[in-house]
Image (cartoon, rainbow, N blue to C red):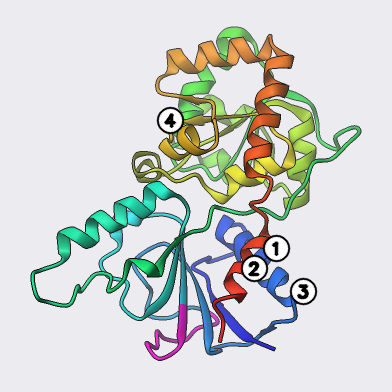
Amino acid sequence: MFEFSIASPHKNVLWYDYRVFINTKHELEKLGCVYKKNAVNRVYLLSPPVRKSYEDVSEFEPDANNIAIIYSHFEKVENLNGFNKVFVPSNLVQDFLLKKRKESSQWFKKNPFLDSKKKLEVLPPYSSLSEKKGKPNLPQCDLCFIGSPRIRPIVEDILPIVEKHNLNFHLYGPGWERYSGNPSAKKFVVAKTIEYHQFADLALAAKICLIDHHETMNEIGAVSHKYVDHLHSGAFLISDKNKDALENYAGVCYQNSKELEELVDFYLKNPIGREEKRREQLDIAKNYTTLNAAKKLMANFI
């Protein structure tokens, strides 16, 4: 059976990249593949540029069967030389990279950026989660957010709304006591960690889950793996304005704090609307599973 390695950029188990790494590794192993450092099949969970080395891939070898899953910082892609296959999260990212390819090409010269557009294929972010029935094992709330405490515009936008309307808001994640933004964030922290399987509990516990993205993901058009995890868990989501969410997921997005306040007010008062939108989005993303992603990766192994 195929041997494979995964080059993952995570620095510790709290990084979301780590969860994508673990899910992908486990699903490929369940399909019979064998995990081995520096194997011939090397899957790069790529947030460009490529690093000199990773924990399980010591250095980039052009002769290996290098496969990239690019999930963020697409604007930093300088070249894709040495990759036999490149998966991108949306048609919008694909168009962006093909445009860069065209701009970097020269007449009668080999394209230094991407030698074949056939290398590019869309592989949407994928999830290993599913909905849960019954009662949640987490405290119920109006709104929730999971993440680390870099300055989060969505948190900055929601806090005045929460305090103005006396809403029940729960924050999950490490380090919020050191948050350098709105100091009131600290009083809404419920737990420093949340287990992956608890996403389904959170979907039951929170009427609205909030999620954000890197600005370039919003502008170019790519939702995160966390976005799809929330959908598979059965959550109703409000996101910052993201082209991919709007075009490919029928997402509920906001552009400014006034829009966010209006959306929160509308959907908190409209459980039927929340349920209809939640089901619509889940139906769109239902096939974006780690198993299906693993099968697609395996089809490119040698």
Q: Which residue, given by chain and number where applicable, does mark 2 sit on?
A: 294
Q: Which residue, given by chain and number where applicable, does mark 1 sit on?
A: 291
Badge 1, how many Cα within 10 Å: few under 14, some, many 20+?
many
* Structural distance between the alpha carbons of marks 4 and 2: 29 Å
Query: Is residue 137 shown left or right of residue 141?
Result: right
Q: Quadrant of residue 249?
A: top right
Q: Is residue 57 above or below residue 247?
A: below
Can residue 63 be seen here? The reply is: yes
Q: Which residues are magenta?
A: 55-66
Residue flagged by tag 4: what amino acid is it? Lys
Residue flagged by tag 2: what amino acid is it? Ala
Q: Is residue 279 above or below residue 263?
A: below
Q: Position of residue 86 (x, y in %)?
A: 43, 68
Q: Position of residue 9 (x, y in %)?
A: 49, 68
Residue flagged by tag 3: what amino acid is it? Lys
Residue 30, label in figure:
3
Asked whether disc 3 touches disc 1, contact meaning CB atoms under 8 Å apart, the reply is yes
Q: Is residue 147 magenta?
A: no
Chain-order first, disc 4 or disc 2 = 4
Q: Which residue, given by chain and number where applicable, does mark 4 sit on?
A: 241
* Structural distance between the alpha carbons of marks 2 and 3: 10 Å
Query: Is residue 172 shown left or right of residue 52?
Result: right
- Determine the secondary structure under disc 2: helix
Asked whether disc 2 touches disc 1, contact meaning CB atoms under 8 Å apart, the reply is yes
